[in-house]
Image: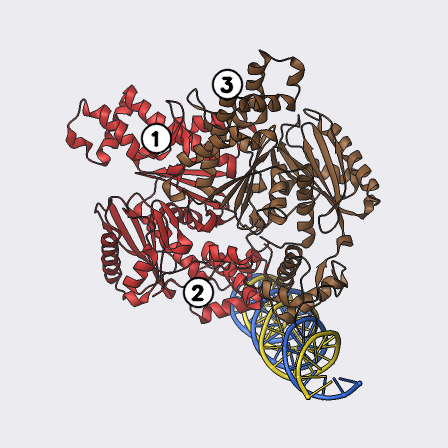
Chain colours: A red, B brown, C blue, D yellow
Amino acid sequence: MKTADPELMRAINRFHVMDAIRRFGPVSRVEISQLTELSSTTVSAITAALLDDRLIVPLQLGAVRDAGRGRPRVMLRLNPGAAHVVGVKLAHDQITVAVTNFCADILRSLALPIRIDRQTASVIGDLVEDGVRRCVSDAGLDIAQISGVCVGLPGVVERSAGVCRQSPILQERDVRFGADLGHRLGVPSTIDSDVNLVTLAEYWFGQARGLNDFLVVNVERSLGLGILHNGELFRGANGLSPDLGDLIVPSLNGGGERLADLASEASVLIEAEALLRENELDASLHQGRAIALLLKRAAGGDERCARTLAAAGEALGFAVASLITLFAPPMVIISGRAMATSDHFIAPLRKTVAALLPASLADVSDIVVREWSDETWVRGAAAMTLRDLYGAPWGTTGPASVRDALAPQVGEL
Amino acid sequence: MKTADPELMRAINRFHVMDAIRRFGPVSRVEISQLTELSSTTVSAITAALLDDRLIVPLQLGAVRDAGRGRPRVMLRLNPGAAHVVGVKLAHDQITVAVTNFCADILRSLALPIRIDRQTASVIGDLVEDGVRRCVSDAGLDIAQISGVCVGLPGVVERSAGVCRQSPILQERDVRFGADLGHRLGVPSTIDSDVNLVTLAEYWFGQARGLNDFLVVNVERSLGLGILHNGELFRGANGLSPDLGDLIVPSLNGGGERLADLASEASVLIEAEALLRENELDASLHQGRAIALLLKRAAGGDERCARTLAAAGEALGFAVASLITLFAPPMVIISGRAMATSDHFIAPLRKTVAALLPASLADVSDIVVREWSDETWVRGAAAMTLRDLYGAPWGTTGPASVRDALAPQVGEL
DNA sequence: CTCTTTTTGTCCGCGATGCGAATTAAATCT
DNA sequence: AGATTTAATTCGCATCGCGGACAAAAAGAG
């Protein structure tokens, strides 16, 4: 088990300082001292070390003149050039790659609209490797300048082991994608559930900033769940990220069904296909079009289309109610593409949640809807890697099994 | 936010040493050094302080002669008399009180078979106060010698605030039971979900000892859920303990229902009443008898009774499958009185879980059945208080909100 | 019985850390 | 130009964990 020594002490405090600088933009040492409750002496020492390592830089511009009298504060901020990382998002029909700097600003991104559905891991590995190399090169960087890569993909992912246990976009099970990509690129590479990435992005940059407990439910072709609990991404035992689609919820025909078969785009599409085929050309059924058409119909007053969406919303409402019961988060973020933002989907969801929650939890959770760009996702992937670079020493003081579960095990090179 | 200073360092290491001594019985300094990975110097210093504080004592008896040659090891163990704490368990038909020493050995226990169902909090407070005073006195102790009291009760409990949000045995909502009892007794008092207590007891003394992730599902009159995650009791945001009965699971008539209405003893009793009333005297329906009769009938081949139990088992199976999906624990402990251990209840539960789990999680969880005595419960309550006395400094290094959520806020006196 | 060997536990000095008080630095106000 | 105010650094101190030297306490060898 990791022992608590002065080194750990410093690591913890250094992380707090870094975190304060990252979160509160250009910030002076006094402010850091207040935010972290560290003495100004300690903050000075730590920032000096960080400046020495070029992880942070002083904001030269005296532009920020505060009305005060005394010696002006020296504002500090992350050094954008301190490191570069790559984020990758794998979706069934697209690979998105982005190169970011140390501030998680996207320098260059690349979208490969390729159906990788049910491809072999090795084929996908080829595509990702090429995409990363290309994107890094386009950003004017050399692959050797990249400090880390993080890949997000749907399914059950065991980040600590770098293994994707099962994913809708992979044929194989238990794919060691992290180490594989690490070998290919010669850069430490990790994988994580795609929703975890966007959850972290939401925590770092989004509207849940500073909110230490919230849930993210992502509705796309498959269903994802991200949990931020006590300011940390929640993972099951062994660092397993849960898959929301595997939850069992009541279905109309009695009994239960996998949520993925009731409330994902994929499941709605099957419903929709039957409904729409009666009147429309098959061409319109191609991919996302069908959802768009379904939404249009529902908006136009088509009862059956509205019912289809409502059923999906209600099914997800069951799951969200259960999750609120377990985690009592002040905020639940529902996200996805067109469907998730449709009121025909969200209104039944809200209604179901309200009906099912016990009185004691009735008002604890705000349910908000939000749509993300592809950039949000890859920015989350970058943030995940940066979080490692910052050196968050969490969980290192617990029993050995705890540490092993939390230690990010990057792909060796 | 709590800052990482030498004091915290020491607190962490002291906790590890205490934990090692508690877990591995009489143990020598060298062994502690190996277990904690602290240097022998540090272990010596810490144990010296602990000895000085009389929290631990050397095992005088040279009885334990190890075959080795050199200087014999001095075995250290917790000092049973270092402190005394009281555990209380509130159930709908009984109040159980126990006084334990610093090793969580029960010195004296007291069972008050009183129906406190739907009593006011103040009446229950009276009963608990009297019970605690009586039990402490019976143990030959003065109330001033008690270092802490922990009360376990079913329902939604916010331990950090000492508030019981809602409980089947309380009329009122948001009862500040912890502070109230603290005032009454003049002893720091906390409350927690009853299942959390038994979960901790299972972790400290039971068959899940050393298992850092497991679930406890308790089936009695109401349903409870305890989650041990990464070696710590899991609580929702704000330290809220979830209530399993509030989960929504599919019901036979389509749609969902609260699990408490499907799989608790209370719900089964309602079913059972209808079935049994046809043939039996009302007298036999009194309380737990009905369950016993139901089980006997089912064992005797009564199809309808067996169905009733199976339906309850299946409903709980749905919930357990969802929980395994979320937490992926290596072990799930099902417990309760007669019903929970009946194969007519457990077999359908297992079957349902097996049918619902995705392939990737099929074999991660052992489902075991276990029955606890009342002593197990109150021992857990004692352990919860002792854990505070040991001074586990967890979560004190996170952002302020984290610390506030985790800091056990004892009832002031 | 004495001396050696072996293992355990303690003492001393080192380096790292955080912190409080004093000090220096850099601006504005008078 | 000097006083005032605020920011940041420097210095001295206490605590901590650790490695190495040292003392303690037993068994085995002679």
How busy is the neighbourhood of tag 1: few (under 14 within 10 Å), some, or many (20 plus)? many
Q: Are marks 1 and 3 on the same chain?
A: no
Residue drawn where x is 19% and y is 25% of the image: A277
A158 sits to left or right of B86: left
Q: Position of residue B320 (x, y in %)?
A: 48, 36
Mark 1, mark 3: which one is toward the viewer? 3
Residue A183: which quarter of the image? bottom left
**Can you give x and y, in whole percent of width and height, for residue A399 in the image?**
55, 57
Q: Quadrant of residue A70?
A: bottom right
Write down the residue under mark 3: B304
Q: Who's the residue at 42% across and 64% down the image?
A: A61
Q: Chain of mark 1?
A: A
> Which callout, 1 or 2, points at the residue further toward the start of the chain?
2
What is the CA distance from the residue labelled 1 to the residue labelled 2? 48 Å
Label placed on residue A56: 2
CA–CA distance in space, label 1 to label 3 = 32 Å
Task: Find residue A262 and name its label.
Answer: 1
Mark 3 belongs to which subunit?
Answer: B
Subunit of label 2: A
